[in-house]
Amino acid sequence: MLKARNRPAKRRTKPAGGLQHRRPTVVEVAQRAGVSVGTVSNVLNGANAVSEARRLRVEKAIVELGYSQNLLAQGLRRRRSTVVGLCVPHTTNAYFSAMMTAFEELASDRGFELMQVLSGQDPKREYKRVEALLRYKIGGLLLVPTRAPGATLDMLARSGTPTVIVDRPAHDDRFDEVSFDNRRAMAEATRWMIAMGHRRFLFMVRERALVVTKQRVIGLTAAARESGEKVTTEVVECPSDEVMVTASLASRFRRPNPPTAVIVSNSTFAALTLRAFRSLKLDYPRSVSLMAFDAPEWGDLVTPRLSVVRQPTLAIARKAWELLIARMTGERTRIQREEFLAEVVIRDSVVPLSDSKR
């Protein structure tokens, strides 16, 4: 019969001075801040469901304790990378540029890396760019889809990659979506201008097939129909090109009873339209008013100041980020749809129309 040998126990040494140096834990952060561990987790993950006072206490405790969230270790435990992919159509308008900046700041503040690609509004390129992101084993994806994202969404569903659709609803039950109410925003802007005497509307868009464009057209025509006035609307699809925009506007302002209100789908179109107005020597804004979706920084610097539909960019980005992190950490199972409200800002580029010009 073999007997176990008694072996001397190994001595554990402590650092000089008798203190054991270790990283503070999330529990200690919660205790220092006087909140629950769940609240600390929500702050670290960028969730919105935390009051500003509690968020500040948590952030103060993090600084005081020198807490550093080990996101790489968390990612390995959950088999998720801490790299988040972001695919948007382009960065030429103020809205998408602001959105990319918001996501970059959210990622940086929470210890994630953001890998950005552009689809160029092309479904085939979108598929290839997202496929490339998946090869990098991203932990999740934020996607502003093209007009026909079906193949890309199927690929994402097969891959199991946590994904949130942003800005342009895909109406796909497999993914969370965060957007704003385009139909309501357009209807409100149109009602304002009808109340100011405008009866002939021209809506200039880059892609009529986009779901957000379709929603805006519905809002435009609904407001016109419900006004009880004789209101006409026209939707024009045009490339973001100065020559093309000028030519398109010129053909319509040469007609009898030209438009008295032009609405454009983004800030790029707004700049091109203003140049066209100047080139065509239109009596702007007394004979024709201008309203733009998007809120470029130069909008309130030009004369007349630009009237805009201001999209809730930061709210959309924060909610999309919150939903994505919840997917990446396995905290959510039910698909969620979130739709924010935009703000119609009437400035000097939209003026009341005199009876003689209606």
Image (tube, grey):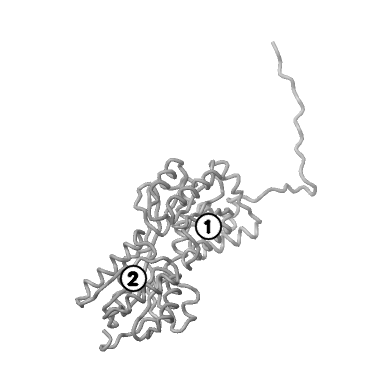
Which residue lies most toward the top here?
1
Q: Is residue 321 visible?
A: no
Per the rendering, the mark at residue 238 is none
Q: Residue 170: image x %, image y %?
A: 36, 53
Give the amino acid at mark 2. Phe
Q: For mark 2, does the 10 Å Cα neighbourhood hold few (<14), some (14 to 19), or many (20 or more) residues? A: many
Residue 108 image offset from top left, x and y in percent: 58, 58
Residue that carries the numbered disc 1 in the rendered image: 43
Badge 2 marks a residue whose secondary structure is: strand
Q: Name the quarter where the C terminus is drawn.
A: bottom left
Mark 2 or 1: in front is 2
For marks 2 and 1, the one nearer the N-term is 1
Would residue 178 be seen by someone viewing this image from the given angle?
A: yes
Q: Write down the residue under mark 2.
A: 203
Q: Vertical placement of 87 versus 268: above or below?
A: above
Point 75% across, 30% down: residue = 9
| Left or right: where 290 falls relative to 89 | left
| Amino acid beneath label 1 | Val
**Residue at the image point whose x is 77% and y is 47% from the top:** 18
Question: Vertical placement of 227 versus 134: above or below?
Answer: below
Classify mark 1: residues with Cα within 10 Å, few (<14), some (14-19) or many (20+): many
Q: Do residues under tags 2 and 1 come within 8 Å of each other at their CB atoms?
A: no
At horizontal 77% and vertical 40% (from top left) the residue drawn is 13
